């Protein structure tokens, strides 16, 4: 049985979980997929490295116990310094985990095994899951798991997390291991000279009375490795006399080593992983031609890559637009009927206006427009986006963008954080943890320039409404403008307040995989589409009702005398300056808590509230009142102007700095004002106004 009932049960029974099991491994290896399968929770999953950036916990019942499973961020090495990787290391060092499931990729054992060897040094109870065994079998690979277990001295289980294969055995073995039913793993991966250095440091540690083992802290072997690298931070908690002695001793051992110890440590471990992988992986028969390589020759080609990316964007937008129209019309017809029926019902029961007004005109029309306008386009767009993501195309975008991003002072991985932003800016901002130093701040500050699903859900249908088929070009242009502002802002930041070098990086391109259609559709509907609808109900509904009151009271004096009327009048000059009007700016301001409510608030600031139950939906009113230039100005300004309030809070949490939060709020606003003003002036010059 799985989380979340189990979590409640565990609390209710007053019994704490009895065992903690951590999931660790390289990025994009299937840790979160496994975690989700075991706990029933919904950690973000996709075919690109660096999605999980914080620790997640979930529960699962196993016989009479509660297992706590911990999904860790992916990491290539336990010695790196980016925040997501530090989180993984510190958790493994904390000794909280009773067992660690270290995952390797069956299709790429040699490279992913390197990390497992580090796990063996940092923890006493490690179990190896050879994941993606299905993909390995498809490629004709045979993995000798028993041999691997013998060579590493730890239990090994073959799994296909995405297909739920091998999971029962994995849990069984992990529980067994967590209870301590296994000798410590082998750790002698190095050549004789390095092993001798290790022995000497370990002897010195033992002489100082440092215990060995997970319960009392990290294994001696791990501490010895740190000291041999000249890293003495691990000793910080010791008393000064012992610390100094150990520092002296390890410095002597380092100095006595003949050769480059740092290089040998890394290289010999790698060579061991290579030897093991070669012994346990067999590939009978002829090498099949590598599809990933062939496709990548075009997709990551120096010149073809950009047309390919543009074509992918164009294809997504076209399918979305043509597919969404009939669905949208059907939903609209339903809400028109529903609002009419509700209004008629209110009349028959003689409901007073202060009840029927907010309920029908505020709630039903507000929420109805959100659903009718946004649902169809959003569902199609995000299903297509997720299919592309599951296939492995997204990291290629980051790879192709690496050169242009370096030219403006950042790097390709910055684009991965932007891809997260297309879903929602909150995880977008958090995902900047995959970067370090200035690059991380640049990614945090620029993320809200990327339209999230709330905004995309508005931009797509309004573009169709105003520009018809040419809407595809308008949305394409808006996406390119948004990416352009990200790059220009990064350039600006890297030349001014965020000068200085950030560490370089390596990025891995996972193999292309056939997307799992059913899973992707379900996941997208649940996590992206339902998310917006739930927000429409929980945030948008109360706010539209509040705005309704602000726009209708004090009653009797006309719209100009209501609070909304006054705000619109106050913002009118600013609105005119940008080719908009005060009502539009007020509606955008109302959408600060949640971007998706802008349509509902436009309905109200357009003075529709009073006779809306007669039921013209806002789209028709806008189509009649706005010129195409006003529509474009609105889309541009609304897309860029600012993140939602929640994202603002998240930016502050991630940066812990009022200064960077202010940058992240004001930079988008400045772009919005500048570019909308230019678009408006150009539009007038071209006679579109
Ligand atoms: N074929 C196959 N694909 C899998 C398997 N397990 C996971 N995947 C796919 O591998 C990709 C990465 O899975 P995730 O669970 O997001 O990987 P992760 O290790 O959590 O990645 P990070 O959080 O980025 O470190 C997804 O596209 C999964 O659908 C498996 O057993 N077989
Ligand atoms: Mg993950």
Image (cartoon, rainbow, N blue to C red):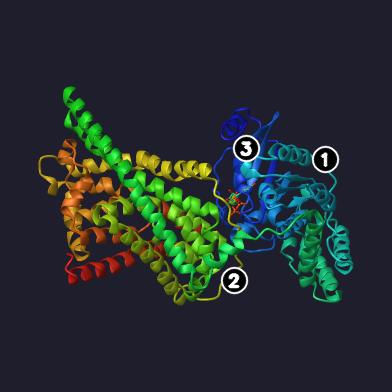
Query: Residue 431: in sight, yes or no?
Result: yes
Label 3 and label 1: CA atoms lie apart by 22 Å
Determine whether 424 is above or below 395 in the image: above
At mark 2, the secondary structure is loop
| In the foreground, 403 or 262 | 403
Q: In which quarter of the image is the C terminus?
A: bottom left
The mark that comes first in sequence, 3 or 1, is 3
Label 3 and label 2: CA atoms lie apart by 37 Å
**What x and y, as percent, mark residue 647?**
42, 54
Residue displayed at 85% across by 73% down: 252
Whether residues under marks 3 and 1 lie with C-beta atoms below 8 angstroms apart, the answer is no
| In the foreground, 165 or 585 | 165
Residue 249, numbered label: none
Residue displayed at 82% across by 53% down: 152
Q: Quick one: label 1, few (<14), some, or many (20+) residues within 10 Å?
A: few
Determine whether 549 is above or below 295 in the image: above
Whether residues under marks 1 and 2 lie with C-beta atoms below 8 angstroms apart, the answer is no
Task: For ligand 1, tell me if the residue under mark 2 lies within 8 Å.
Answer: no
Residue at far front of view:
286
Query: Residue 656: in sight, yes or no?
Result: no
Whether residues under marks 3 and 2 lie with C-beta atoms below 8 angstroms apart, the answer is no
Instruction: Tell me if 434 is positioned left or right of 236 in this view.
Output: left
Q: Name the residue under label 2.
A: 503
Residue at far left of view:
557
Determine whether 335 is above or below 624 in the image: above
**What x and y, as percent, mark residue 482?**
38, 64
Q: Mark 1 points at which residue?
A: 181
**What x and y, as percent, mark residue 532?**
39, 44
């Amino acid at each position: 049985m799985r989380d979340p009932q189990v979590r409640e049960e565990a609390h209710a029974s007053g019994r704490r979980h009895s065992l903690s099991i951590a999931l660790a491994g390289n990025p994009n290896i299937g840790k979160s997929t496994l975690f989700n399968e075991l706990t029933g929770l919904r950690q973000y999953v996709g075919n690109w490295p660096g999605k999980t950036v914080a620790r997640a916990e979930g529960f699962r019942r196993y016989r009479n116990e509660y297992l706590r499973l911990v999904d860790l961020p992916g990491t290539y090495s336990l010695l790196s310094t980016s925040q997501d990787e530090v989180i993984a290391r510190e958790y493994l060092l904390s000794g909280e985990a009773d067992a660690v499931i270290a995952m390797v990729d069956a299709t790429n054992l040699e490279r992913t095994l390197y990390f497992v060897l580090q796990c063996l040094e940092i923890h006493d109870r490690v179990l190896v899951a050879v994941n993606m065994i299905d993909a390995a079998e498809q490629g004709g690979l045979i993995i000798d798991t028993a041999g691997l277990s013998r060579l590493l001295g730890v239990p090994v289980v073959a799994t296909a997390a995405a297909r739920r294969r091998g999971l029962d055995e994995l849990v069984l073995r992990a529980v067994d291991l967590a209870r301590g039913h296994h000798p410590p793993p082998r750790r002698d991966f190095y050549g004789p000279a390095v092993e001798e250095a290790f022995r000497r440091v370990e002897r010195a540690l033992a002489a100082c009375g440092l215990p060995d083992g997970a319960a009392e802290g990290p294994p001696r072997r791990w501490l010895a490795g740190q000291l041999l690298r000249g890293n003495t931070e691990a000793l910080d908690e010791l008393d000064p006399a012992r610390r100094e002695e150990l520092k002296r001793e390890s410095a002597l051992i380092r100095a006595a080593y003949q050769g480059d110890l740092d290089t040998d440590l890394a290289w010999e471990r790698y060579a061991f992983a290579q030897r093991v992988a070669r012994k346990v992986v067999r590939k009978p028969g002829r090498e099949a031609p590598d599809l990933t390589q062939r496709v990548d020759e075009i997709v990551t080609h120096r010149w073809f890559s950009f047309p390919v990316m543009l074509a992918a964007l164009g294809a997504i937008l076209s399918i979305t637009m043509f597919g969404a129209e009939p669905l949208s019309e059907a939903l609209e017809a339903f809400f028109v009927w529903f609002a009419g029926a509700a209004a008629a019902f209110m009349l028959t029961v003689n409901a007073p206006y202060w009840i029927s007004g907010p309920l029908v005109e505020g709630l039903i029309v507000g929420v109805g427009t959100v659903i009718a306008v946004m649902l169809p386009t959003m569902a199609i767009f995000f299903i297509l986006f997720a299919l592309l993501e599951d296939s492995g195309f997204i990291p290629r975008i980051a790879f192709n963008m690496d050169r242009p991003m370096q030219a403006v002072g950042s790097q390709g991985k910055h684009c991965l954080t932007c891809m997260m932003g297309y879903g929602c800016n909150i995880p977008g901002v958090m995902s900047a943890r995959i970067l370090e130093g200035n690059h991380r701040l640049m990614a945090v500050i620029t993320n809200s320039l990327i339209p999230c699903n709330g905004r995309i859900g508005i931009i797509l249908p309004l573009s169709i409404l105003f520009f018809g088929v040419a809407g595809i070009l308008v949305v394409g242009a808006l996406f390119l403008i948004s990416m352009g502002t990200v790059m220009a802002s990064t350039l600006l930041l890297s030349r001014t307040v965020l000068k200085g070098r950030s560490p370089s990086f390596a990025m891995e391109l996972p193999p292309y995989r056939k997307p799992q259609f059913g899973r992707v559709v379900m996941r997208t509907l649940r996590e992206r589409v339902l998310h917006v609808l739930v927000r429409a109900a929980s945030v948008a509904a109360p706010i539209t009702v509040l705005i309704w009151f602000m726009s209708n009271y004090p009653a009797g004096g006309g719209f100009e005398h209501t609070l909304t009327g006054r705000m619109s009048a106050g913002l009118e000059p600013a609105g005119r300056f940008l080719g908009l009007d005060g009502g539009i700016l007020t509606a955008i301001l109302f959408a600060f808590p949640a971007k998706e409510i802008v349509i509902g608030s436009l309905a109200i600031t357009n003075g529709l509230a009073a006779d809306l139950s007669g039921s013209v939906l806002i789209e028709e009113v806008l189509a009649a009142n706005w010129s195409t230039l006003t529509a474009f100005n609105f889309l541009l300004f609304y897309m860029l102007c600012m993140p939602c309030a929640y994202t603002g809070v998240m930016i502050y949490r991630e940066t812990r700095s009022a200064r960077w939060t202010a940058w992240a709020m004001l930079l988008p606003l400045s772009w919005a004002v500048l570019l909308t003003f230019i678009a408006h002036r150009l539009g007038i010059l071209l006679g579109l106004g």
